[in-house]
Amino acid sequence: MLRPVALLAAALLWPAGVLAQTRPTTPAPASPTPALSTLTSAATIPAPESAAKAKKPPSPKQLAAHERMQRCNAEAREKDMHGDPRKAFMKGCLSTHTAPNT
């Protein structure tokens, strides 16, 4: 009688041997690849109409914050600030500047 371990080993090795014998020895001829790239790229490019609808103009609050950031960055650049002193300066600068027409 065969041991269970031997049966398990034979069961695991048997399909590999069968598959190895049934593989073709010559490579298959190269078939032209389908034009998947055109399908993929066309699907990922948004239509011009949807792109125009997706982008909203910035709000007045966002514009004011952007202007404050530009002013504070320019000041920090003039003073040649880097690292922690620049962070502290930017924090104070951004909190003190008020938006125009507020």
Image: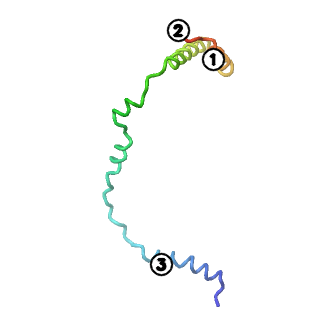
47 and 33: which one is in front?
47
How crowded pointer 2 is (Cα within 10 Å; few <14, some 14-19, many 20+) is rated as few
Q: What residue type is disc 2 on? A: Asn
Q: What residue type is disc 1 on? A: Met
Which secondary structure lies at badge 3? helix
Q: Position of residue 16 (x, y in %)?
A: 51, 75
Q: As displayed, is residue 38 above or below residue 30? A: above
Which secondary structure lies at badge 1? helix
The residue indicated by pointer 2 is 101
Sequence order check: which comes first, mark 1 or mark 3?
A: 3
Q: Residue at x 31, y 57 (%)?
A: 32
Residue 90's disc number: 1
Q: Residue at x 35, y 51 (%)?
A: 36
Determine whether, in the image, residue 61 is placed left or right of residue 41. Answer: right
Determine whether, in the image, residue 40 is placed left or right of residue 89. Answer: left
| Cα–Cα span, label 1 and label 2 | 22 Å
Q: Position of residue 1 (x, y in %)?
A: 65, 91
Looking at the rendering, which quadrant does residue 55 occupy?
Answer: top left
Q: What residue type is disc 3 on? A: Val
Q: As displayed, is residue 14 above or below residue 36? A: below
The residue indicated by pointer 3 is 18
Residue 55's disc number: none
| Cα–Cα span, label 3 and label 2 | 82 Å
Q: Position of residue 42 (x, y in %)?
A: 34, 43
Looking at the rendering, which quadrant does residue 90 occupy?
Answer: top right
Observer-side mark, 3 or 2, equals 2
Number of marks drawn: 3
Q: Residue at x 56, y 15 (%)?
A: 68
Determine whether, in the image, residue 84 is placed left or right of residue 18. Answer: right
